[in-house]
Amino acid sequence: MELAETIATRLVDVQARIRNALRAAGRPRDAVRLVAVSKTFCLEHVRAAIEAGLEDLGENKVQEALEKSAATSSLPVTWHFIGHLQSNKARKAAGAFDWIHSVDSVELLRRLNRAAADAGRRPQVLIQVDLAGEATKHGATEDDVALLVAAAQACEHLELRGLMTLPPWSPDPEAARPFFHRLATIRQQLLPTLERPDKFDQLSMGMSYDLEVAIAEGSTMVRVGTALFGPRRPRVQKSSVPADK
């Protein structure tokens, strides 16, 4: 089976899972955005995903995303940064990504704001919240979320849109439910403090193995890689496909 056909077939399955989860939760059919996580996959996979109809792609390395976005600049793609963003990469990220899911410090917000101003862009940003306190995970603590939200609202060149979290890994998707529920609760608690609560409408949570649980708890963005592209590869492979002109 051709790569594009394989991804298209998998996409049908993922979309069915999302529709079924939304129906079970009594939510509208268009309430969740599917972000295809193409990190570590090569340009052929990115092109095949776009050909299959995917318009939102997620990456966790700035340089890898820059190479892919440059090679697909003529195609309709919205790029999402979903990994840990170091402050020294803020300038490149602000110029390359439409959405940044992983803002976790005031310093990063300030750097992104300056970089976005210089680039003439206005990225949509989410505050990443670490609800489990895992040493291997990044994110603001629950106690610091309000501080970051206030700082983000003061950034004229960033659009604060919501929150993101990564629950601890478990083979049981239900184990993620308390973390998803807590993130949704935090968003609700923050709404009265916001200048534009109508814009603070995004919860980025849920991946290939637990998207149904995330949707049941209010997710508006699911970040799906394995269910679309197959097992994760250790690094990006060299592509023989020429860049778009």
Image: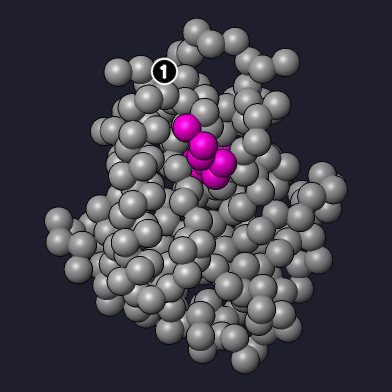
Residue closer to the observer: 142 or 30: 30
Residue drawn 46% across and 64% down?
29
In the rendered view of the protein, which quadrant contains the N terminus?
top left
User: What is the count of numbered marks?
Assistant: 1
Find numbered disc 1 in the image and state the secondary structure of the residue it sits on: loop
Regarding residue 136, the answer to whether it shows in the image is no
Q: Position of residue 161 (x, y in %)?
A: 62, 67
Residue drawn 20% across and 68% down?
174
Residue drawn 35% across and 69% down?
23
Check disc 1: other Cα within 10 Å, few if <14, some if 14-19, many if 20+. Answer: few
In the image: residue 143, left or right of residue 210 = right
Report if residue 61 lies within the magenta region.
yes
Q: Position of residue 63 (x, y in %)?
A: 57, 31
Report if residue 91 lies within the magenta region.
no
In the image: residue 233, left or right of residue 84 = left
Q: Position of residue 175 (x, y in %)?
A: 20, 68
Residue closer to the observer: 227 or 130: 227
Most distant residue in the bottom direction: 192
| Above-or-below relation of 79 to 75 | below
In the rendered view of the protein, which quadrant contains the C terminus?
top right
Q: Position of residue 148 (x, y in %)?
A: 60, 73
| Above-or-below relation of 77 to 31 | above
Residue drawn 62% across and 38% down?
77
Regarding residue 85, the answer to whether it shows in the image is yes
The residue segment tinted magenta is 52-62
The residue under label 1 is 237
| Above-or-below relation of 50 to 134 | above
Q: Amino acid at mark 1?
A: Gln
* Colouring scheme applied when the structure was drawn: one colour
